[in-house]
Image (spheres, rainbow, N blue to C red):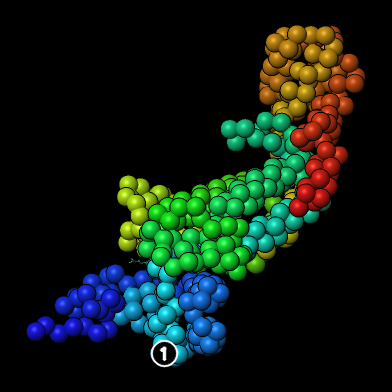
Amino acid sequence: MSTVNTEKLSSARFAEATDAFVEVFTASVDFDQRMAQQDIQGSLAHAEMLCKIGILTAQELQDIQNGLAQISKEIADGEFKWSIKQEDVHMNIEARLTELIGIAGKKMHTGRSRNDQVATDIRLYLRNEIDTILAQLSRLQHALLNLAAREADTIMPGFTHLQVAQPVTFGHHLMAWFEMLARDRERLQDCLKRINVMPLGAAALAGTTYPIDRRLTAELLGFSRPSNNSLDSVSDRDFAIEFAAAASLIMMHLSRFSEELILWSSAQFDFIDMPDAFCTGSSIMPQKKNPDVPELVRGKSGRVTGHLVSLLMLMKSQPLAYNKDNQEDKEPLFDTADTLVNCLRAFADMMPHIRAKKDNMYRAAKQGFATATDLADYLVRKGMPFRDAHEVVGQAVRLGIDSGRDLADISLPELRQFSDRIDEDVFDILKLEGSVAARDHIGGTAPNRVRAAVEAAREQL
Ligand code: ARG
């Protein structure tokens, strides 16, 4: 007669003990213990529902509640003994519960499977993470609004192709960042709607024969409703993929902000001063002050997008319903949330300390004939077709390049060589202040529009 491994999960089915390596290979407890509190939360609601429908007695429910409270404390205090023999967070907690309270512990899993249990835990986990992420996002957005209000009049070059294009205000540039984050916030909130649906009751895949009250469990856990289809509930991780996609977009935005901060703090641009507390020095070059925080954030954006791709590939081609493949969803998901929270926090902490070097920004905006389009628009207002105006301005720019002067520094008689429609009032628009003030419409860079955008955004937040 063969020996039965009594410690093994579903032990009676097995004649042989699990291979020692396979035991380690298939276990997830090292990482999924991260969802312990969610697992307990789910179990408490499930047990309460089982009691309501008469599967558990009031005493059994009480025992389960006491036992889980103790386990929760043991875990929080770091005293809980996680065992790889129990494979994952779910079995570890259930085994400890049975150790603590006996028979009622063995009843807790009635009408449930780890398949609907784990799907529930992930949803509860993501719900919490999204709350944390939204709070950090909001801190960053407020910091941007404060900075944009302060810098609403600060003129800097606007770029296309990283070449000076037209003058803009620094406040306007910062509000562009704000808009990106506002869409990111909406995406997370939207994704939350699909996360907040309860899989419990789907059991292994087909539902359960007990007269469960799924609405009650959903209500107890704060889910908007029970899921519609048991097969779908235990298998799909599209909600996690959506979260990873929203996270990747945020990181992509942060990588763009990072890139600009890095450029601006270089000696070549010298547009901003980065706070010392967010930079580090070099071990060999004593003069260096490196923008480490934005560089790291830029780097970390790659790893979050990597996780998105991992999750997509994990889900691709999986037949219904649950497959063990899905155990692989946790690590990329946890790292996505952790990385995102940390990067947002670093940015939110750093942003209020960024100082604009206004003179350098102004000087740079004067360099690339940034008001050339304004001169063309001026000629159009005086009746010249745009194409002809474009040509006239090209000649004026040529003169500026040859004589090393900005358009605003060329004299009126010289400008009039190219067109006699040019009068003294041209200098109002050739000045950088005039150029930005003239873009006075919804979404424009005029300082009063930037201030209005900040105000509108404050109300919306
Ligand atoms: N640890 C598993 C996971 O993360 C829990 C579900 C296991 N279910 C099963 N039938 N093997 O997906």
Q: Residue at x 75, y 41 (%)?
A: 172
- Give the answer, above or below, for where 458 lies relative to 42: above
Using the rendered view, name the quadrant where residue 359 is placed.
Answer: top right
**View quadrant of ligand 1:** bottom left
Using the rendered view, name the quadrant where residue 389 is placed.
Answer: top right
- The quadrant of the image that shows the N terminus is bottom left
Image position, residue 378 (x, y; %) = 82, 18
Q: Residue at x 40, y 49 (%)?
A: 312
Q: Residue at x 61, y 65 (%)?
A: 219
Q: Residue at x 23, y 72 (%)?
A: 22
Q: Nearer the viewer, residue 414 or 8?
A: 8
Residue 331 visible in the snapshot: no
Number of marks present in the image shown: 1
Would you say 92 lies left or right of 257 here?
left
Would you say 340 lies left or right of 323 here?
right
Image position, residue 308 (x, y; %) = 45, 51
Give the residue pinned by disc 1: 102
- Give the answer, above or below, for where 169 lies relative to 237: above
Q: Nearer the viewer, residue 323 or 398?
A: 323
Image position, residue 155 (x, y; %) = 78, 40
Q: Nearer the viewer, residue 127 or 169?
A: 127
Image position, residue 110 (x, y; %) = 42, 74
Tag 1 secondary structure: loop
Residue 52 visible in the snapshot: yes
Would you say 384 lies left or right of 246 here?
right
Q: Nearer the viewer, residue 193 or 272?
A: 193
Residue type beneath disc 1: Gly
Which residue is situated farthest in the left direction here? Answer: 1
